[in-house]
Image: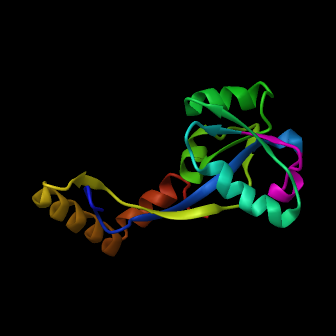
Amino acid sequence: KETYNFTDPYYQDAVGILVKKDKGYEGLKDMDGATIGVSQSSTTSGLIDEEAEQYGITLKYSEFATYPEIKAALDSNRVDAFSVDRSILNGYSDDSTVILPDRFGTQDYGAVTKKTNTELAEYLNDLVNGWLDDGTIDAMIAEWGLSE
């Protein structure tokens, strides 16, 4: 917030895990020894490891430069899972995969502008709040399958 302006939050998401259905995983607790594909420089593995400790399981991670690379690794069984924000996973889900119910590191989403562009920041914030008030954002969340 020292460098950028943010609108009020319009969506809340969390890190999730996408797996192939044929693995039979029902949640993180079933994944002892699994390898999870994550984005380079992400905090995803740390968030998942905090939860894994509670289940007494150990996980491995493979880092990739892009999300399509992680999905290709999942499809070819080079990793057992793909982990990033659940809204992003939704775009990579297909008939052979499922997003597990686990959620890690919940965070708010908002639009961002340059700190010096206060006029645009105020305009976007007014738009976001209007869309929250009139149900537009809830309708988009439902339309794109992002609601729980």
| Image-quadrant location for residue 146 | bottom right
Residue for point 82% across, 43% down: 21
Q: Is residue 31 magenta?
A: yes
Q: Residue furthest bottom?
A: 133
Q: Nearer the viewer, residue 106 or 97?
A: 106
Image quadrant where one finds the C terminus: bottom right
Residue 54 figure quarter: bottom right
The answer to whether residue 30 is seen in the rendering is yes
Against 73, residue 9 (above or below) is below
> Magenta: predominant secondary structure element?
loop
Compared across the picture, whether 126 is left or right of 96 comes to left
Q: Is residue 81 above or below residue 101?
A: above
Q: Is residue 70 magenta?
A: no
| Residue drawn at 32 percent across, 72 percent down | 134
Q: Residue at x 50, y 51 (%)?
A: 144
In this view, 8 is above or below 140: below
- Give the image location of residue 57, x and y in percent: 87, 55
Which residue sits furthest left? 119
Instruction: Using the image, determine if residue 70 lies above or below residue 144.
Output: above
Q: Position of residue 90 (x, y in %)?
A: 59, 46
Q: Which residues are magenta?
A: 24-36
- Residue 140 locus on image (x, y percent): 43, 57
Indicate the colouring scheme.
Answer: rainbow
Q: Nearer the viewer, residue 123 or 63?
A: 63
Position of 43 with respect to 4 (left or right) is right
Relative to 86, 55 lies left or right: right
Quadrant of the image containing the N terminus: bottom left
Query: Can residue 27 be seen at all in this image of the molecule?
Result: no
Tell me what residue is drawn at x 44 percent, y 63 percent.
11
Closer-to-camera residue (147/7): 7
Q: Position of residue 126 (x, y in %)?
A: 21, 68
